[in-house]
Image: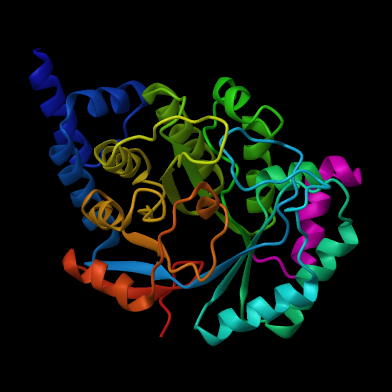
Amino acid sequence: MSELLEVDKLQEAVLDGYVVDPSEALFLYQKTDLITLGKIADELKTKTKGDQIATYLIDRNINYTNICVTYCKFCAFYREEGNSEGYVHSITEIIDRVAEAKKKSATQILLQGGHHPSLTLEWYCKLLSEIKHKYPEMTLHAFSPPEIIHFSQLFGMSIQEILGKFKECGMDSMPGGGAEILVDSVRRKIAPLKANTDEWLSVMKALHELGMKSTATMMFGHVETIEERIEHIFRIRELQELTHGFLGFIPWLYQPGNESLGLLSASGQEYLKTVALSRVILNHCLDNIQASWVTPGKKIGQLGLKFGANDLGSIMLEENVVSSTGTHYKMDVQEMRRLIQEMGFEPKQRNTFYEFVN
């Protein structure tokens, strides 16, 4: 059979619900043009979601500290302990920011920080419990797998113990931060001191077993190959098929600037093709694919809604990590809704769990 007939046959099978393996996913990526792969992903999304709705979230990303001991090469945000630009926000200040977010219709607070070497377990528990006491309706989407691994080592506790304690204190769900690329050879190049692949996945598995949900992310367009990118998505798929604990998948671009990798990021076309491939690989087990606008820009993010994504992410009333590279994209509700409508979809505000708000 000719290569053209083989790819045509595989495309038809995918549209009929066939679940691809890694070699087939690579074949599709390499042999299917951008527009065709986008159409396949868009059709799969429509079949799965059953509507013409695109969702968005209103939240605030509060980075409680920028002090970190992992020194990731792609990160422009972290500062070493003792640096004059390092900070730890007080719990009172953080609660004031939550109050501001509440007034602006936010439903989620994302709490993440650097791997601080000396903050105590009691500090983290007090942070969670005081926010939840004052704002019980606010979803605390908190920490990340590498932070949990750091806490486990710092406090001499198991992952399960820490997650259980945080759940008791008010943690509701977890972002998929720190995944970067879930291939250890890549992680050693860009974040050698951060949690490895199996550790990242083990935290998510433990979280799901406790009945909590999370998102999954992939930061791509740096030193990884296409094959390694695909391996990452399949590691997410394997865990999702086991636990069904991931709410959505968020692929986003490496953003150069003020960090030590100093590479060029991937193109908008490569971003869109990767979003589309994510839908193809994950569609049978994970309904929600998010298009990012923070790193590729609003126009590319908007186009992602035609390449398999059903969500345009968050308004983000506060964002500190990407902006530290020198990239500053802002969004308000009116613009978010306009971008969605321009692509022919009905905009709907959602919460963390992809439930419509109002």
In the image, residue 181 sits, relative to residue 39, either above or below, namely: above
Against 345, residue 104 (above or below) is below
Q: Residue at x 50, y 67 (%)?
A: 353
Would you say residue 164 sits in the magenta stretch?
Answer: yes
Residue 232: horizontal and vertical position, in percent?
48, 32
User: Residue at the spot x=79%, y=58% of the render?
Assistant: 164
Q: Which residues are magenta?
A: 152-172
- In the drawing, does residue 138 fall left or right of residue 156? left
Q: Is residue 252 above or below residue 112?
A: above
Residue at screen point 24% across, 63% down = 50
Which residue is found at the position 72% from the left and 30% from the top? 193
| Majority SS type along the magenta span | helix
Q: Does residue 46 appear left or right of residue 241 in this picture?
A: left
Q: Is residue 126 magenta?
A: no
Q: Report the front residue among 36 and 315.
A: 315
| Front residue of 125 and 71 | 71
Question: Residue 273, percent across and down?
Answer: 26, 38
Q: Position of residue 188 (x, y in %)?
A: 62, 23
